Image (cartoon, grey):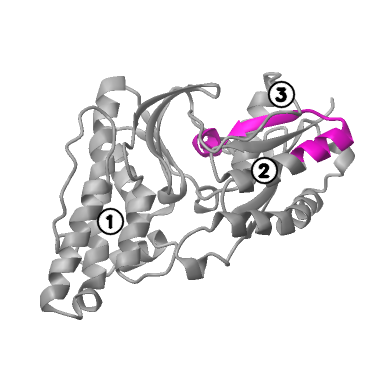
Amino acid sequence: MKENVILGIESSCDDTSAAVIVDGILRSNVIASQKVHEEYGGVVPELASRAHQQNIVPVVDAALRQAGIARGDISAIAFTRGPGLLGSLLVGTSFAKGLALGLDIPLVDVNHLHGHVLSHFIRENADDEVPEFPFLALLISGGNSQIILVKAADDMEILGRTIDDAAGEAFDKCAKVMGLPYPGGPHIDRLAAEGNPKAFMFSKPHIPGLDYSFSGLKTSFLYTVRDGLKTDPDFIDRNRADLAASVQRAIIDTLMQKLEIAVKQTGVRSVAIGGGVSANSGVRQAVGDFCAARGLKAWIPPRKFTTDNAAMVAIAGYFKYLRGETCPLDAAPFARIEI
């Protein structure tokens, strides 16, 4: 029987990635990160798209070579159609279309958010355990904070979402105020281990239902730092670890509060996390403890699959390919797209 070989391509933001999955098993996952944005304190869209153009051919070539797969063996090409930076998406979309046309194979468009949710189905070995449906997914990244009821690979319902800043934005913006490099989330995570999480109290949102809000927390953090600097010019330097620990605790508390409500409302017995913020040590510990205390199954992904990567695009595309869901060559990328 012919193998199902899926080439995945991810270019939604500032990482160019290609991966190969064969019959559901990951063979390669190559990522080229862009350092050019660090001096600007955030991703510059035009620079990102130019870097994707430089990286995409060698990245795809490396993924195929590492997987031991020839171009003629590819069954389909899965690519991130959105959401993301439009210029970056155009690079990946255009490359995927050209290669699919040249090889006369189908295209599979993937929702970037679906990829994060389905990253738990990436298997590096045939006996790797994967979640059973249904499960709750807490998707937390720089641009999204959502609670999703995952009924099947093609059936996801958003129960709650952020109405302003996402959790990752809150981490990065607070880190910037503290003078930490971009991206700030990992630096806050590192400093939080050295600080007192109860040193500072920040405002907590009071949003009905399962929706999130982090803008008030961020503003409260800014006021705390501003007031501290009025009396102590070295306030940030003296309190950096405590500030990091306190803001991390506040963000985690906000995430877990709504997650607990969702578990009670749905009765689902499995909880998965995904997205870049799921690499945070505090978040991983909190979700693990939360599930252990309630007899729930916790699905916490390896850190290498939390950030943007093509393995998650390939596995999401693999499921769609098996269902016969392909897309036409005139499919256009979207900067914003819902689950």
Magenta residues span: 96-120
Q: Is residue 318 left or right of residue 293?
A: right
State yes or no: residue 156 in magenta: no
Please, what is the three-letter code of the amino acid marked with disc 1? Gln
Residue 141 % position (x, y): 43, 46
Q: Which amino acid does label 3 sit on?
A: Thr
Residue, far front: 46
Q: Which of 72 and 301 is in front in this view?
A: 72
Q: Residue placed at 54% from the left, 48% from the top?
A: 305
- Residue drawn 27% across the image and 64% down it: 244
> Which residue corresponds to mark 2?
90
Magenta-drawn stretch, dominant element (helix, strand or loop): helix
Rendered image quadrant of residue 238: bottom left
116 part of magenta stretch: yes
Give the answer, above or below, for where 197 lies relative to 39. Answer: above
Q: How far apart are marks 3 and 2 (CA)?
A: 18 Å
Residue at figure coordinates x 87%, y 30% from the top left: 104
Q: What residue is disc 1 on? A: 248
Quarter of the image for residue 260 reads top left
Cα gap from disc 3 to disc 1, whole angstroms: 41 Å
Q: Which residue is drawn at 18% across and 55% down?
A: 220
CB under 8 Å between callouts 2 and 1? no
The amino acid type found where label 2 is placed reads: Leu
Please name whichever residue, 149 or 83, is drawn nearer the observer in this view of the structure.
Answer: 83
| Circle 3 or circle 1, nearest the eye | 3
Instruction: Give the structural element (helix, strand or loop) at label 2.
Output: helix
Nearer-N-terminus badge (3/2): 2
Task: State left or right for residue 215 relative to residue 33.
Answer: left
| Residue holding disc 3 | 326
